[in-house]
Image (cartoon, rainbow, N blue to C red):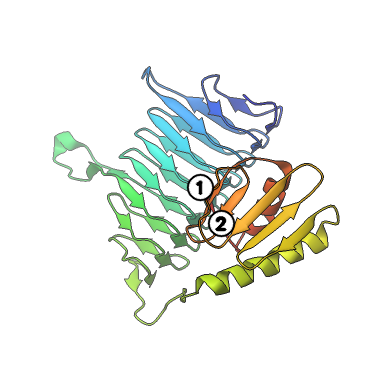
Amino acid sequence: MSSTNQIHETAKIHKNVRLGEYNRIGKNVLIEIVGNDPDAEVVIGDNNIINDNTRIFVYSSLDIGDWNVLHNDMLLMAEQEMKIGHNCWFGQNTILDAAGGLEIGNGVRVGMYSQIWTHVASGEQIEGCTLYAKRKTTIDDDVWLVGSCVVGSGLYLGKRSTALINSVITKDLEANRVYSGSPAKLMEKANFYKDVTLDKKFEMLNGWLQEFVSLNQDVQIRLEEKRTKLSDNNSDVVFTMEEEDNTEKGYFLLHNKTFNKSNSELERRVYKFLYNNKARFLPA
């Protein structure tokens, strides 16, 4: 494991976990590979936060990308494959179950006390009980489960769909739609997104970058028509509106929301400033 990680002395991490850089793992966190599957594995990327008392049990495989936050007292159970993309946020006491397989995209936000299930099991099958099934659940990019939501097994939650607080989701959610209730029903007139031009996005981004510089006196900024460069004494970070023929690290491309990751201190500081609800990018 990289020495750049901050791991509390009370955390217990299985020796075969592949952990990237600049992760922060809190007290009493448990990441355990259990069972007898020789191919079972856990891969965790860079710049993730796994907060206190979160428990992770992996029987098959768990793959977590970059810049995710797993808050306090979560429970992850990866009996089958569980995949979590980049830039996701999970509130405290959330349960993620992958008994039937679970795939979570990028930028997904799951409010506290939510439960995502991929199996159902109750009475005895020998007595004819039919309440037994394992089915994969897929949550697409930028889905928002506001809080205390329950997601049933075998469902697909479309990109940018939203379920309001206390929603119980028993059917697939359409992309870009808002749902609420138990069971969750479509709110016909609700819409939480509007169209934004690339020029307007660059204008907003530059405003935030200038605010970042005003709060960090060691950083200089150079604004150009379609390009903005931040510099400190050690490195540069560049944001561009359109694709450039450049493979250098620390380049952020606004047109497709990707960046060539360097993990420099400046890059991580800037990204942390933007990350919460201003702008998120995906590693190229």
* Residue neighbourhood size for the residue with mark 1, other residues' Cα within 10 Å, grouped as few (<14), some (14–19), many (≥20): many
* Picture layout, residue 16 above or below residue 7: above
Q: Is residue 241 left or right of residue 184?
A: right
Residue extending farthest front: 245
For the point 46% across and 61% down, which residue is it? 145
Q: Nearer the viewer, residue 160 or 136?
A: 160
Residue extending farthest right: 217
Quarter of the figure with residue 202: bottom right
* Picture layout, residue 234 above or below residue 18: below
Question: Contact, CB < 8 Å: mark 2 with mark 1?
Answer: yes
Question: Does any portion of residue 275 appear in the rendered image?
Answer: no
* Residue neighbourhood size for the residue with mark 2, other residues' Cα within 10 Å, grouped as few (<14), some (14–19), many (≥20): some
Quadrant where the N terminus is found in the figure: top right
Quarter of the figure with residue 126: top left
Question: Could you tell which of marks 2 and 1 lies nearer the N-terminus?
Answer: 1
Q: Amino acid at mark 2?
A: Arg
Q: Amino acid at mark 1?
A: His
Element assignment for label 1: loop
Instruction: Determine which residue is flagged by label 1.
Output: 86
Q: Nearer the viewer, residue 169 or 18?
A: 18
CA distance separating discs 2 and 1:
9 Å
For the point 54% across and 36% down, which residue is it? 45
For the point 53% across and 34% down, which residue is it? 44
Image spot of residue 39 (x, y percent): 37, 21
Instruction: Determine which residue is flagged by label 2.
Output: 280
Q: Is residue 93 left or right of residue 174?
A: right
Residue 5 - label = none
